[in-house]
Image (tube, rainbow, N blue to C red):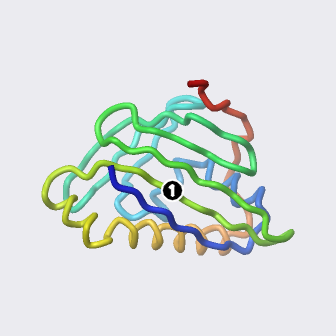
Protein backbone atom coordinates (compact mmCIF):
# COMPACT_ATOMS: atom_id res chain seq x y z
CA UNK A 1 0.00 0.00 0.00
CA UNK A 2 1.11 3.55 -0.71
CA UNK A 3 0.06 6.64 1.16
CA UNK A 4 -0.31 10.37 0.84
CA UNK A 5 -1.08 13.17 3.30
CA UNK A 6 -1.96 16.69 2.19
CA UNK A 7 -3.75 19.65 3.74
CA UNK A 8 -5.22 22.99 2.76
CA UNK A 9 -6.48 25.95 4.78
CA UNK A 10 -9.88 27.20 3.64
CA UNK A 11 -11.43 30.54 4.54
CA UNK A 12 -14.78 29.20 5.74
CA UNK A 13 -15.98 28.03 9.16
CA UNK A 14 -15.29 24.40 10.05
CA UNK A 15 -19.01 23.53 9.79
CA UNK A 16 -19.18 24.86 6.23
CA UNK A 17 -16.08 22.93 5.12
CA UNK A 18 -17.27 19.72 6.78
CA UNK A 19 -20.84 20.02 5.49
CA UNK A 20 -19.62 20.51 1.91
CA UNK A 21 -17.29 17.51 2.17
CA UNK A 22 -20.28 15.31 3.10
CA UNK A 23 -21.81 16.12 -0.30
CA UNK A 24 -20.01 13.28 -2.06
CA UNK A 25 -21.99 13.64 -5.28
CA UNK A 26 -20.33 17.08 -5.71
CA UNK A 27 -16.80 15.60 -5.71
CA UNK A 28 -16.50 15.62 -9.54
CA UNK A 29 -16.67 19.43 -9.30
CA UNK A 30 -13.23 19.57 -7.69
CA UNK A 31 -11.62 16.10 -7.85
CA UNK A 32 -9.63 15.31 -10.97
CA UNK A 33 -10.44 11.92 -12.43
CA UNK A 34 -13.68 11.48 -10.48
CA UNK A 35 -16.50 11.14 -13.00
CA UNK A 36 -19.33 10.32 -10.61
CA UNK A 37 -20.06 9.54 -6.97
CA UNK A 38 -23.46 8.17 -6.04
CA UNK A 39 -24.63 8.06 -2.43
CA UNK A 40 -26.22 4.61 -2.02
CA UNK A 41 -27.01 4.91 1.70
CA UNK A 42 -25.80 6.88 4.74
CA UNK A 43 -22.62 4.80 4.75
CA UNK A 44 -22.16 3.52 1.17
CA UNK A 45 -21.03 5.34 -1.99
CA UNK A 46 -20.39 4.16 -5.54
CA UNK A 47 -17.50 5.78 -7.42
CA UNK A 48 -16.66 6.00 -11.12
CA UNK A 49 -13.13 7.26 -11.74
CA UNK A 50 -10.74 7.63 -14.65
CA UNK A 51 -7.11 6.92 -13.70
CA UNK A 52 -4.59 7.45 -16.48
CA UNK A 53 -7.26 6.74 -19.08
CA UNK A 54 -8.54 3.61 -17.30
CA UNK A 55 -12.16 3.72 -16.08
CA UNK A 56 -12.74 2.04 -12.72
CA UNK A 57 -15.79 1.64 -10.51
CA UNK A 58 -15.86 0.69 -6.86
CA UNK A 59 -17.93 0.98 -3.72
CA UNK A 60 -16.69 2.65 -0.56
CA UNK A 61 -18.01 2.39 2.97
CA UNK A 62 -17.89 5.27 5.42
CA UNK A 63 -16.35 3.69 8.50
CA UNK A 64 -16.39 6.72 10.77
CA UNK A 65 -18.02 10.12 10.63
CA UNK A 66 -18.00 12.76 13.35
CA UNK A 67 -19.60 16.08 12.42
CA UNK A 68 -17.09 18.93 12.05
CA UNK A 69 -14.18 16.56 12.83
CA UNK A 70 -13.64 13.63 10.44
CA UNK A 71 -14.89 11.32 7.73
CA UNK A 72 -13.12 7.96 7.20
CA UNK A 73 -13.77 5.38 4.51
CA UNK A 74 -12.49 2.23 2.86
CA UNK A 75 -13.26 0.59 -0.45
CA UNK A 76 -15.29 -2.60 -0.26
CA UNK A 77 -14.47 -3.87 -3.74
CA UNK A 78 -12.35 -3.02 -6.75
CA UNK A 79 -9.54 -0.55 -6.12
CA UNK A 80 -8.15 -1.04 -2.59
CA UNK A 81 -8.01 2.24 -0.76
CA UNK A 82 -8.82 3.81 2.57
CA UNK A 83 -8.66 7.33 3.87
CA UNK A 84 -9.69 9.96 6.34
CA UNK A 85 -10.28 13.66 6.02
CA UNK A 86 -10.11 15.76 9.18
CA UNK A 87 -11.29 19.30 9.84
CA UNK A 88 -9.44 21.57 12.27
CA UNK A 89 -10.85 24.93 13.34
CA UNK A 90 -8.07 27.51 13.01
CA UNK A 91 -10.36 30.43 13.89
CA UNK A 92 -14.02 31.34 13.43
CA UNK A 93 -13.68 31.63 9.64
CA UNK A 94 -10.71 29.42 8.77
CA UNK A 95 -10.40 25.63 8.69
CA UNK A 96 -7.54 23.24 7.96
CA UNK A 97 -8.67 20.26 5.88
CA UNK A 98 -6.25 17.32 6.03
CA UNK A 99 -6.55 14.35 3.68
CA UNK A 100 -4.80 11.03 4.33
CA UNK A 101 -5.06 8.26 1.73
CA UNK A 102 -3.74 4.73 1.52
CA UNK A 103 -4.11 2.91 -1.76
CA UNK A 104 -2.80 0.00 -3.77
CA UNK A 105 -1.57 1.08 -7.21
CA UNK A 106 -2.51 -1.38 -9.97
CA UNK A 107 -0.42 -1.99 -13.05
CA UNK A 108 2.74 -0.41 -14.32
CA UNK A 109 1.22 3.02 -15.07
CA UNK A 110 -0.26 3.49 -11.58
CA UNK A 111 2.89 2.17 -9.88
CA UNK A 112 5.06 4.56 -11.91
CA UNK A 113 2.67 7.43 -11.19
CA UNK A 114 2.87 6.67 -7.48
CA UNK A 115 6.68 6.60 -7.52
CA UNK A 116 6.78 9.90 -9.45
CA UNK A 117 4.55 11.62 -6.89
CA UNK A 118 1.62 12.06 -9.24
CA UNK A 119 -0.87 10.87 -6.60
CA UNK A 120 0.52 13.36 -4.07
CA UNK A 121 0.17 16.21 -6.56
CA UNK A 122 -3.33 15.14 -7.53
CA UNK A 123 -4.40 15.08 -3.87
CA UNK A 124 -2.84 18.50 -3.29
CA UNK A 125 -4.50 19.92 -6.40
CA UNK A 126 -7.87 18.37 -5.46
CA UNK A 127 -7.68 20.07 -2.07
CA UNK A 128 -6.81 23.39 -3.71
CA UNK A 129 -9.82 22.99 -6.02
CA UNK A 130 -11.98 22.17 -2.97
CA UNK A 131 -10.70 25.38 -1.35
CA UNK A 132 -11.59 27.43 -4.43
CA UNK A 133 -14.97 25.69 -4.76
CA UNK A 134 -16.14 26.30 -1.19
CA UNK A 135 -14.63 29.78 -0.84
CA UNK A 136 -16.19 30.90 -4.12
CA UNK A 137 -19.60 29.58 -3.02
CA UNK A 138 -19.24 30.85 0.55
CA UNK A 139 -21.68 28.21 1.75
CA UNK A 140 -22.20 24.49 1.48
CA UNK A 141 -24.51 22.92 -1.13
CA UNK A 142 -25.97 20.62 1.55
CA UNK A 143 -25.04 18.69 4.65
CA UNK A 144 -25.27 15.33 6.35
CA UNK A 145 -24.75 15.74 10.09
CA UNK A 146 -25.16 12.09 11.07
CA UNK A 147 -22.60 10.17 13.08
CA UNK A 148 -21.03 6.85 12.10
CA UNK A 149 -19.19 5.24 14.98
CA UNK A 150 -15.76 3.72 14.36
CA UNK A 151 -16.00 -0.09 14.18
CA UNK A 152 -14.62 -1.87 17.22
CA UNK A 153 -11.67 -4.22 16.54
Write the residue at 19% across / 65% down: 112
Write the residue at 20% across / 54% down: 54
Write the residue at 22% across / 62% down: 52
Query: Where residue 126 sits: x, y (%)?
Result: 47, 67
Task: Say how many tags the image has.
Answer: 1
Position of the C terminus, as image quadrant, is: top right
The crowd level at tag 1 (other Cα within 10 Å; few <14, some 14-19, many 20+) is: some
Residue 47, compared with residue 135, is above or below; it is above
The single residue placed furthest to the top in the displayed view is: 152
Query: Where residue 66 sits: x, y (%)?
Result: 71, 41
Name the residue carrying label 1.
Answer: 100
Residue 111, compared with residue 142, is above or below; it is below
In the shown orientation, is residue 108 left or right of residue 103?
left
Q: Nearer the viewer, residue 1 or 92?
A: 1
Residue 66, compared with residue 49, is above or below; it is above
Query: Where residue 7 sits: x, y (%)?
Result: 57, 68
Query: Where residue 57 sits: x, y (%)?
Result: 30, 41
In the shown orientation, is residue 79 left or right of residue 4?
left
In the shown orientation, is residue 82 left or right of residue 66?
left
The image quarter containing residue 62 is top right
Amino acid sequence: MSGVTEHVDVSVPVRTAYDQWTQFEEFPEFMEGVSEVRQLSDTMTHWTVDIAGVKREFDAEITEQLPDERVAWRSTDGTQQAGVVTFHRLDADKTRVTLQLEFEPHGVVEQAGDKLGIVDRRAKNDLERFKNYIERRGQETGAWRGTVDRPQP
